[in-house]
Amino acid sequence: MNQNWHGTLIRHMLLLVTGCLLVGLISGYYGWSLAIGLGLYLGWTLKQLLRLHEWLRQHTPDEAPPDGYGLWGEVFDSIYHLQRRDQRVRGRLQAVIDRVQESTAALKDAVIMLDSDGNLEWWNRAAETLLGLKTPQDSGQPVTNLVRHPRFKEYFEQDNFEEALEIPSPTNDRVRIQLYLTRYGNNEHLMLVRDVTRIHQLEQMRKDFVANVSHELRTPLTVICGYLETLLDNVEEVNPRWSRALQQMQQQGSRMQTLLNDLLLLAKLEATDYPSDNHPVAVQSLLQTIKNDAQALSGERGQHITLEADPSVLLKGSEGELRSAFSNLVFNAVKYTQDKGTIRIRWWADHQGAHLSVQDSGIGIDSKHLPRLTERFYRVDSSRNSNTGGTGLGLAIVKHVLLRHRARLEISSVLGHGSTFTCHFAPTQVSRSQAIAAEE
Ligand code: ADP
């Protein structure tokens, strides 16, 4: 109520009282006329209040308020203007929300909002095509019930969303999708899903190409190497000037064969997510044979190789793949450790899982190379490789095998003082041999 209305109200009341007193003066009933006058005023006020209540209860958004007199008219108009202003603000907000929803709906990528427990809250149209979500039935459902790929469940539960996850779409096996999860607000999740079928196809073409070329080259190379071997077996019949050339050709030939074998192995590892077999592997005896091979490889260089392995700790996975990975690490240690150096192989388990470490007192690696070491054909020093006959694929193979066995590789090294390569396996991959543990 502003100052104006305050004065008017007082004036009205004074007028009413004066009128009543005048009637009282004429009629001689002061009390009655004052009571009747004030009663009438109260009745009128109550009527206005009822009209206001009626209008507030039943009016349509744009319906004007009832005509009011005096202060009541002012009250009706103020409420009406407040309501209109509120409507306009809400309309503007709704328009903004509509625009945001329209633009996200038009996105080719799926956007899904999940609550802190991973239940679906909101999603756009692309989510219906890429993930097969149904509006509105799926609202409030746990996302892991709708995207049922085992790797998605693992990814969602592991809580580390640094890297995206690539899986086939639940609606169509031929569509490949990439999922990114981010946390926001009160531990809610925002999930973005992209169709990466084309990139996946190109990647697949690259892998197929490398695999096919390696495969096709293998046969001619075997023939060439075979003939070279025959020629070298009968070296006395060959012109002596050719014998050194033949030896070098055989050396390079067998290097190419190792390279092709490694490329084929990598292609095989990339073809599937997990190893086909998942039996408990007796790592201790596997390491024992690798150690013997390493000793043979070391030969006259006299390196001191030791093995400390817990025979009761078994590892679920593919024996063949684990053999390639572990032997790559141990043979690298032999290759990159000077004569009479030491190499220590250890296999143990604790509450964090199982661990294999290969420690050497060799030449070591500068820390700047460590992040890129597992890349294909990455070489610390290209001149080193020609001496050791390495392919540059060994650690890439190790990385892939470990990925498939839910493990990670840790490399620590000091230039000139040796290196330690440690494979950390998740506790779910470890299985204990009861018989051996009981014997101990
Ligand atoms: P390569 O077949 O050349 O050995 P890898 O992928 O196995 O290829 O290794 C990549 C590079 O990492 C090697 O060229 C070598 O320089 C370095 N490296 C690997 N293992 C060791 C080690 N134990 N000590 C020092 N350097 C190593």
Image (cartoon, rainbow, N blue to C red):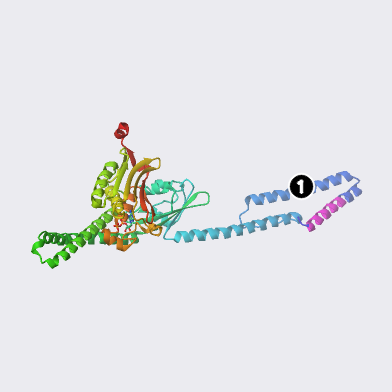
**Residue 15 belongs to the span the image colors magenta:** yes
User: Is residue 429 toward the left or the right of residue 300 in the image?
Assistant: right
Majority secondary structure in the magenta region: helix
Q: Quadrant of residue 199?
A: bottom left
**Residue 163 belongs to the span the image colors magenta:** no
Q: What percent of the width, then of the height, locates residue 408?
A: 37, 50
Q: Residue at x 59, y 57 (%)?
A: 90
Give the amino acid at mark 1. Answer: Gly
Q: Residue tagged by mark 1?
A: 43
- Mark 1 lies within 8 Å of ligand 1 (Cβ measured): no
User: Is residue 378 toward the left or the right of residue 111 in the image?
Assistant: left
Q: Nearer the viewer, residue 147 or 417?
A: 417
Q: Give the class, few, some or many, for how many residues have Cα within 10 Å of label 1's Cα (few <14, many ≥20).
A: few
Q: Residue at x 70, y 48 (%)?
A: 50
Q: Is residue 280 visible?
A: no
Q: Nearer the viewer, residue 278 or 134?
A: 278
User: Is residue 382 toward the left or the right of residue 57 in the image?
Assistant: left
Residue most toward the top?
Answer: 438
- Quarter of the rendering occupied by the C terminus: top left
Residue most toward the left?
Answer: 237
Q: What percent of the width, then of the height, locates residue 29?
A: 89, 45
Q: Is residue 57 visible?
A: yes
The residue stretch that appears in magenta: 3-19
Q: Nearer the viewer, residue 329 or 177?
A: 329
Disc 1 element = helix
- Quarter of the rendering occupied by the N terminus: bottom right
Q: Quadrant of ligand 1?
A: bottom left
Q: What percent of the width, then of the height, locates residue 241?
A: 13, 68
Q: Nearer the viewer, residue 102 or 75?
A: 102
